[in-house]
Image (cartoon, rainbow, N blue to C red):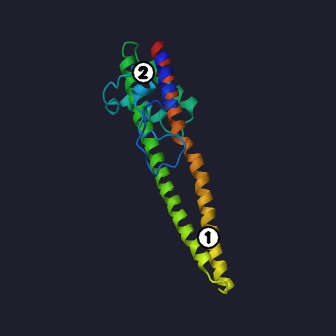
Amino acid sequence: MRGLLAGVAALALGAAGPAPADPDWPCVQRLVPRLTAGTIWAGHEAGGDWRANPPVAAVVNQAAPRSRRLPDAVAALDTFAAAVPASERPAALSQVFAGLVDETNRQRGDVIESLRGTARRQRSLTEITSGITAELRALPADAPAARREEIVQRRTFLIREYEEIERTIRYACEVPGALEARLGSFAQALQRDLNK
């Protein structure tokens, strides 16, 4: 149990080692592209292909979705573990955890790619807004008011879009960490089930 908690703490503190700089990563949090089972559950052994074991695959598919409330997901893991004979539990729960790591990485990967795309869109908006600002400044003093107003409206629209993206990014940047924490909760539940 101590190893499990140390692994979760190390992950939360970013002790997995520095990730390469990614110019498209918009979050303050350090980018950890993939999670590994051993980082979260010290001493965890993968235990084979979890997809090849139908009961394991079924419980992974029950517990892993982000839309599933954490207490319900943990209850599904506990129910599964209780049905496995004690002698088979270490191998079965290792497979379950391997599946949960894979599914969490898939979900995190989707979020990370979405964040990168959003950052690229935001960078593009910055460049476009910069160009429009330069266009506005370059207008002669005697330019028609309608022309000036059209440029100001375009610029205002782009600034609003940029600010909306900024709010979205702030929220979305919390998702990878929340998924890591969820996986840590799964590891704790499976460790408890293993010790029963």
Q: Which residue is mark 2?
A: 42
Label 2 residue SS: loop
Residue 157 image offset from top left, x and y in percent: 62, 68
Q: Are marks 2 and 1 in contact (CB under 8 Å)?
A: no
Identified at 57% across, 73% down, the residue is 134
Query: Where residue 125 appears, x then y in whole percent?
Result: 54, 64
Q: State the residue in front, 20 or 101.
A: 20
Q: Residue at x 61, y 75 (%)?
A: 137
Front residue of 196/175: it is 175
| Residue neighbourhood size for the residue with mark 1, other residues' Cα within 10 Å, grouped as few (<14), some (14–19), many (≥20) | many
Q: Residues within 10 Å of mark 2 (few under 14, many from 20)?
A: some
Q: What is the number of the mark on residue 138? A: none
Residue 54 visible here: yes
**Number of numbered markers:** 2
Identified by mark 1, the residue type is Arg
Q: Earlier in the sequence, mark 2 or mark 1?
A: 2
Spatial CA span between label 2 and label 1:
52 Å
Q: From what the image shows, is residue 133 above or below residue 48?
A: below
**Residue receiving disc 1:** 155
Secondary element under disc 1, as helix, strand or loop, is helix
Question: Residue at horizontal 50%, vertical 34%?
Answer: 180
Mark 2 residue type: Ala
Which residue appears at 52% of the width and 65% of the height? 127
Residue 196, given in percent of the width and then of the height, sits at 48, 12
The residue most toward the right is 145
Picture coordinates of residue 113 (x, y %)? 44, 49
Quadrant housing residue 88 = top left
Answer yes or no: is residue 76 visible. Answer: no
Q: Nearer the viewer, mark 2 or mark 1?
A: 1
